[in-house]
Image (cartoon, rainbow, N blue to C red):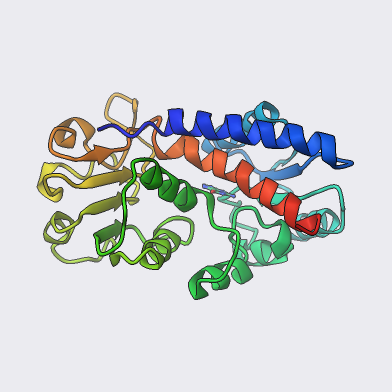
Amino acid sequence: MIISGKEISMKIKEQLKEEVAAIKENYSRLPKLVVILVGDNQASKTYVRNKERGCAYIGIESEVLKHDDTFSEAELLAEISRLNNDDSVDGILVQLPLPQHIEEEKVLKAIDPNKDVDGFHPQNAARLFLGQQSFVPCTPKGMLVLLDEINYDLKGKEVVVVGRSNIVGKPISLLCLQKDATVTIAHSKTKDLKKICSRADVLIAAIGKPKFFNHEYIKDGAVVLDVGINRDENNKLCGDVDFEDVKDRVMAITPVPGGVGPMTITMLMQNTLEAFYKRNGE
Ligand code: GUN
C-alpha cells in the first residue's frame, strides 16, 4: 500500500477550511500565521511559498516577513517581540535554517510558547518530553496522522527511527513511545544499522541521504515512513528510501514527493487553528 499524504492532507485541509468558515461566523477575526524568512535558501523559499498557499487555501490569514541575510539577530529578536505582543497574530514561525550569524536557540526561545506553532520552543519540547499537552512539531504530528489513517496501532510495535534531529527524530521517537511502541533511535554513529532496521515493524527514515535504505534494511511487511527530501542522480526529487527496491515487500510506504511532506504543512495549519482557539480561551 502506498500512503498518499497528498490525498490525506487534502481531506484534512477541506475539514480545516470548514472550521475556518465557522470561525468567520463566530469570531471577530480570522486566525493568523506569520512566517519569518531570513536569507536566500532556495529550499526554504519553496517551503515558505507552500505555507502561504496552504493558508490561503483554508482561509487563514498569513504574512511572510522576508529579510536578506544582513538582517541581524537583534533585529530578528525585536521583530519576534513585536509579533509576540500583537494580538492579531496567533502563530509565529521562523523558517530554519537561519544564517550563520544568528543563533537558532536564542531565536526559538524568544517566540511566545503560546504562538509557537512549530513546537520548537524549549517549553513545548519539555512538555512533549513529559507527555503533557503541547504544540507538537508538524512533521512528526503528520506522521502519526498517516499511521492513524491506515488504522495502524503502534502498541507493542518495534519502531526504529533513523535520525535524531530536534525537528523530526527526537519528537517522533517520544510520540511513538507515548503510543506504547518499543522505540530505537539510530543515527550516523550507529553500528550495524542494517540489522537494527531489519527488526523494525515501522521504519522512520530521516537521515537526508538519497535512496539510502534498500531492501536489505527492511523487514517484509514493515511500514516505512520516509521523511527525506533529496535529489537523486538525475536531479529528481527522492526520499531516504529506495522506493522501487522496497515497495513490493512492505505493508505500507510513503512516497516522496506526496507522502510526509504535504502533511507537514497541513499540520502547521492545524497548529495555527489550535493556537487561535487557545488564545480565545478555548
Ligand atoms: N525547516 C525545515 N523544516 C522546518 C520546519 O518544520 N519548521 C521550520 N520553521 N523550519 C524548517
In the image, residue 90 sits, relative to residue 261, either above or below, namely: below
Horizontal side of residue 219 vs 36, given as left or right: left
The total number of labels drawn is 0
Q: Which residue sits at x=50%, y=33%?
A: 9
Residue occupying image coordinates x 34% and y 25%: 236
Q: Position of residue 188 (x, y in %)?
A: 27, 61
Specify the quadrant of the image occupied by residue 250: top left
For the N terminus, the quadrant is: top left
Q: Nearer the viewer, residue 103 or 168?
A: 168
Q: Is residue 203 left or right of residue 28?
A: left
Q: Position of residue 145 (x, y in %)?
A: 44, 46
Residue name at image x 17 percent, y 59 percent: 193
Residue 16 vs residue 191, the one in the foreground: 16
Name, please, the residue furthest toward the right: 28
Residue 228: image location, x then y, percent: 36, 42
Foreground residue among 14 and 62: 14
- Residue 249: give x, y in percent of width and height: 13, 38
Tell me if residue 72 can be seen.
no
Q: Measured along the vertical axis of the image, is residue 215 above or below residue 165?
A: above
Image quadrant in which the C terminus is located: bottom right
Compared with 19, 137 (above or below) is: below
- Looking at the image, residue 117 sits to the left or right of residue 165; the answer is right
Q: Quick check: can you spot residue 59?
A: yes
Query: What residue do we see at 70% from left, 28% from top?
Result: 56
Image-quadrant location for residue 3: top left
